[in-house]
Image (tube, rainbow, N blue to C red):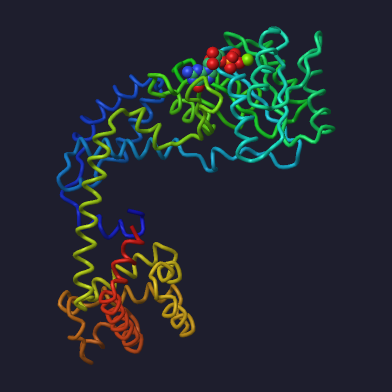
């Protein structure tokens, strides 16, 4: 269910709130799970602490235990943290030839990932890609890229013995321009451990190529270490994203969370095998589930929430269909409208209501009216809200006065309520209400 109606449902589904103890107990297990998944200790600690503050006091869904509820909250929070602002799979490759710089430790999967991404750009986007190996320390590594290029039908820059990485980068740039390539990818050398010479070399290449993307390739099986590596590369070279390789293995991928939390860099792709099409765009939901390793609990809670939401929606709908759309319902709607960016947002979601929105707009309806209308409803007694037919002239006077508004304004509200109740009823008969409510979830 989207946020749109959740405020409404929250009230209806509350069976109790998570106590601090509930949360603490559940989070102890979560913490162990995170550490087992190779999330670095400080990251796991901070994460658990943040969730603890967030979760305490939250509602527990009916038929779900507090512990299960906490797991679901943790899962959603993990997913939230792992989600970047932009589409992870969209590489910035406008203005051809666009340089992409690949960095990382030796053996992390740089060369393989370079070929995988080149293939992807070629196959999916029809791009002409040129790959160049800058690994001058290891002739075999340069050969390796040329062989991979042959396998996927992507050109590689001819190898010229004796050149420095910077010279190769310059030649790649020239060749990419002259040859009409859309993208050129620079596969840099790696070391087994990070050292200053390696970093200095990569920085020099960066300055020459001015890459649109600098992708850090990290072995997803290395937990703690990966974070230090990422931090160092980002500080010294600046990376635009991370590719996690070997996610086809048994590792739970905790490095993803650590890296995201510490460097703030988005994970863009995951490598899922040695084959050259074994790469996918990063999916926060999947990795979150994997890191936590409690997928069945998350699914259970989601199912329970869905069931309750469906039940509540059904109940509300039945009442609306019978024309029982009272002032409490209207107030709830008005409050939702305020949250959702006003009248237009709301009406845009109800099929067949566009006309009504237009009418209201023409009648000078704006969002400050929402606030006044809510004030009017607040000024009604419980009975009046449940049964708007009670609103005789004397009552109206009292209500308007209580809200500090004119009776004419209350009259407008009453009229609007009638219209909406009528609309709900009509839509209910045609089955449109059901559709509309489904659309909101
Ligand atoms: P580089 O030194 O960083 O260039 O690493 P390579 O690209 O040469 O990869 C080192 C080894 O890891 C090779 O045997 C690759 O086939 C393997 N490899 C790379 N990516 C993946 C992956 O996502 N999954 C698996 N299982 N193996 C991978
Ligand atoms: Mg390599």
Seen in the picture, residue 208 relative to 11 is either above or below; the reply is: above
Seen in the picture, residue 193 relative to 410 is either above or below; the reply is: above
Question: 68 or 22: nearer the eye?
Answer: 68
Q: Let me know if residue 370 appears in the view.
A: yes
**What x and y, as percent, mark residue 251?**
39, 20
Left or right, 349 with reference to 421: right
Number of labels in the image equals 0
Q: Residue at x 36, y 55 (%)?
A: 3
Question: Can you name the residue that lies furthest to the bottom here?
Answer: 393
In the rendered image, the quadrant that contains the C terminus is: bottom left
Question: 26 or 95: nearer the eye?
Answer: 95
Q: Let me know if residue 219 appears in the view.
A: no
**What x and y, as percent, mark residue 21?**
19, 34
Q: What is the quadrant of residue 118 in the picture?
A: top right
Question: 223 or 395: nearer the eye?
Answer: 223
**What x and y, as percent, mark residue 177?**
82, 33
**What x and y, as percent, mark residue 326?**
22, 76
Q: Residue at x 48, y 30 (%)?
A: 260
> Ligand 2: which quarter?
top right
């Amino acid at each position: 269910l989207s946020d749109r109606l959740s405020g409404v449902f929250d009230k209806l589904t509350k069976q109790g709130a998570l106590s601090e103890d509930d949360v603490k107990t559940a989070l102890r297990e979560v913490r162990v799970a995170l550490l087992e998944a190779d999330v670095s200790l400080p990251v796991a600690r901070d994460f658990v602490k943040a969730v603890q503050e967030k979760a305490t006091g939250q509602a527990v869904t009916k038929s779900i235990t507090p512990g299960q509820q906490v797991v679901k909250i943790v899962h959603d929070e993990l997913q939230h943290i792992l989600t970047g602002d932009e589409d992870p799979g969209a590489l910035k490759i406008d203005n051809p030839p666009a340089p992409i710089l690949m960095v990382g430790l030796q053996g992390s999967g740089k060369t393989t990932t370079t070929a995988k991404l080149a293939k992807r750009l070629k196959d999916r986007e029809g791009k002409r890609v040129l790959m160049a190996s800058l690994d001058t320390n290891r002739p075999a590594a340069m050969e390796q890229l040329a062989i991979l290029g042959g396998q996927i039908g992507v050109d590689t820059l001819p190898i010229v013995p004796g050149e420095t990485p910077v010279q190769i980068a310059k030649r790649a740039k020239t060749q990419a321009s002259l040859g009409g390539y859309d993208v050129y990818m620079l596969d840099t050398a790696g070391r087994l451990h990070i050292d200053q010479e390696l970093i200095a070399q990569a920085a020099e290449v960066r300055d020459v190529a001015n890459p649109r993307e600098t992708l850090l390739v990290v072995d997803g099986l290395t937990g703690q270490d990966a974070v230090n590596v990422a931090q160092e590369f980002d500080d010294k070279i600046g990376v635009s994203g991370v590719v996690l390789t070997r996610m086809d293995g048994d590792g739970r991928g905790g490095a993803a969370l650590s890296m995201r939390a510490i460097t703030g860099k988005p994970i863009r792709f995951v490598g899922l095998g040695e084959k050259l099409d074994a790469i996918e765009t990063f999916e926060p939901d999947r990795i979150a589930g994997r890191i936590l390793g409690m997928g069945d609990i998350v699914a259970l809670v989601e199912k329970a929430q869905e069931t309750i939401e469906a039940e509540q929606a059904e109940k509300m709908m039945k009442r609306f269909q019978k024309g029982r759309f009272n002032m409490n319902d209207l107030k709830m709607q008005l409050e939702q409208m305020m949250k959702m960016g006003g009248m237009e947002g709301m009406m845009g979601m109800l099929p067949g209501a566009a006309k009504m929105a237009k009418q209201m707009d023409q009648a000078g309806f704006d969002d400050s009216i929402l606030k006044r209308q809510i004030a009017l409803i607040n000024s009604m007694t419980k009975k009046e809200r449940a049964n708007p037919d009670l609103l005789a002239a004397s009552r109206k006077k009292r209500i308007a006065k209580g809200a500090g508004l004119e009776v004419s304004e209350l009259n407008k509200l009453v009229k609007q309520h009638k219209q909406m109740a009528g609309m709900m009823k009509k839509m209910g008969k045609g089955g449109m209400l059901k559709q509309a409510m489904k659309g909101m979830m």
